[in-house]
Image (cartoon, coloured by chain):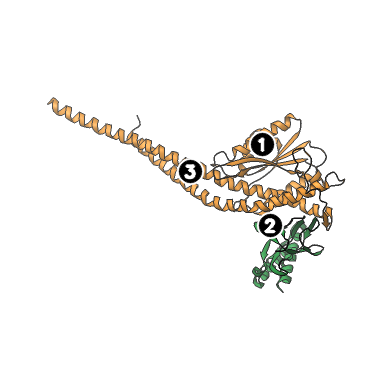
Chain colours: A green, B orange
Amino acid sequence: MAETIQFELVSPARLVKSEPVEMVVVPGSEGNFGVLPRHAPLLSTVRPGVIDIYTAGVISERIFVAGGFCEVNGETCTLLAEEAMPLPEVTSELVAERRRAAEDRLQEAETPAEKAAAEAALTVVNAMAAALN
Amino acid sequence: MASLKDLRNRINSVKSTRKITSAMKMVAASKLRRAQEAAEASRPYAERMQRMLGNLAASTQGAAGSPPLLAGTGKDDVHLLVVLTANRGLCGGFNGNPVREARRQIQALKAQGKEVKLLCVGRKGRDLLRRDYKNLIVDSFEGLGRRGITYAEANQVAERLLTMFEAGEFDVCTIIFNKFQSAMTQVVTPRQIIPFPVPQDAEGTPQGAGGALYDYEPSEEGILKDLLPRNVAMQLFAALLESDASEQGARMTAMDSATRNAGDMIDGLTLTYNRTRQAAITKELIEIISGAEAL
């Protein structure tokens, strides 16, 4: 078996994944980056998007994350996601529903903080819709 | 000697008390399961975030211009204690213990000539602390987590903390809460959240990830600016969840022993009741017999 790196994906609700992987591609805020074993230490913010986990050279799992932080050091890659769900669970109904909720929030937002939060939610929805296609 | 009627009333009243305590116990038990799951599920995230920040903090230690949330304000004159308690009582030592710890810390800090401020989360803690330290309480939150703790609620408290910190109202912030260990035991834990405590090894030198220097995307300040306030909210959230699970556990245990005590009391009272009744019957019989003999 090829060399692996410990990949950990945690959301506030639970530890989603903790297993050795061959490569993982993370949607960093400055562009996607692939993490292989012995990657240089890196800390990056993560934009809403899809993580690809590679096994034997092909994508074995795809997980949608709604932004967060990613830390890479030699042996582990830890991703703190605000929200994470396997891509198959992202359906067009879910996207439509969340888009409605986010747009309502934007309409009702009064303070700048509320508005920013609603806009952030909308960005997540847009990323979800993009991931769907 | 209490009359038969008095005893009967007494037994009935203890019986209805027992009904209430056993109902409360069952409610707490079912809430406990959910609260415990939530608390345990939040641990990995909070721990990883601590570790990530720990590495980050260690590698940026001593660098000029690191944000005050990480490096502190450069002094520690004003301490803010955030005390997490329940909104309701009837849960054994759950509310008393963190309050006692808070009192101890207040005394210790005052002895060192520091200024102390208090922020109470939960009605009971506020009520208890208000008696002695009314002028120290800067704010209090009540009615959090009526339907389970949400991140939004934790964030609300965190934002209040951050605004106060930015306004320079305190230098060091510690939360005091009940850490959930099992349904029977809660451990009162003080945890410093502002400034971020850099993990140190035995010699007191900061521990880093083997001195590895990180690459930052987009930038060091950008990440820290994002990560630090979020960590405050997350640590609060985790503490609130722990506290909630502890509360249910404490209440369940307290109500369980209350139910058992009520049962013991009922047994005792029933015994007295039966004895008294028997004594009355015997007395009546003796009266009848001795009356008949006298004839």
Q: Nearer the viewer, residue B204 or A11?
A: B204
Disc 1 residue type? Ala
Marks 1 and 2: which is nearer the front?
2
Within 10 Å of disc 1 (Cα), the crowding (few <14, some 14-19, many 20+) is many
- Snapshot quadrant of residue A23: bottom right
Marks 2 and 3: which is nearer the front?
2
Number of residue marks: 3
Q: Nearer the viewer, residue B140 or B260?
A: B260
Q: Which residue is mark 3?
A: B256
**Mark 1 or mark 3: whose residue is earlier in sequence:** 1
Query: Which residue lies at the image location 66% right of the left edge and 52% below the top edge?
Result: B44
Q: Chain of mark 2?
A: A
Judge whether B68 appears above or below A94 on screen: above
Give a yes or no on whether discs 1 and 2 share a subunit: no
Q: Which residue is mark 1?
A: B102
| SS at circle 3 | helix
Q: Position of residue B138 (x, y in %)?
A: 71, 41
In this rendering, does residue B170 appear at all?
Answer: no
Disc 2 residue type? Val
Left or right of residue B185: residue A129: right
Q: Position of residue A77 (x, y in %)?
A: 74, 57
| SS at circle 2 | strand
Q: Which residue is mark 2?
A: A10
Q: Position of residue A28 (x, y in %)?
A: 78, 62
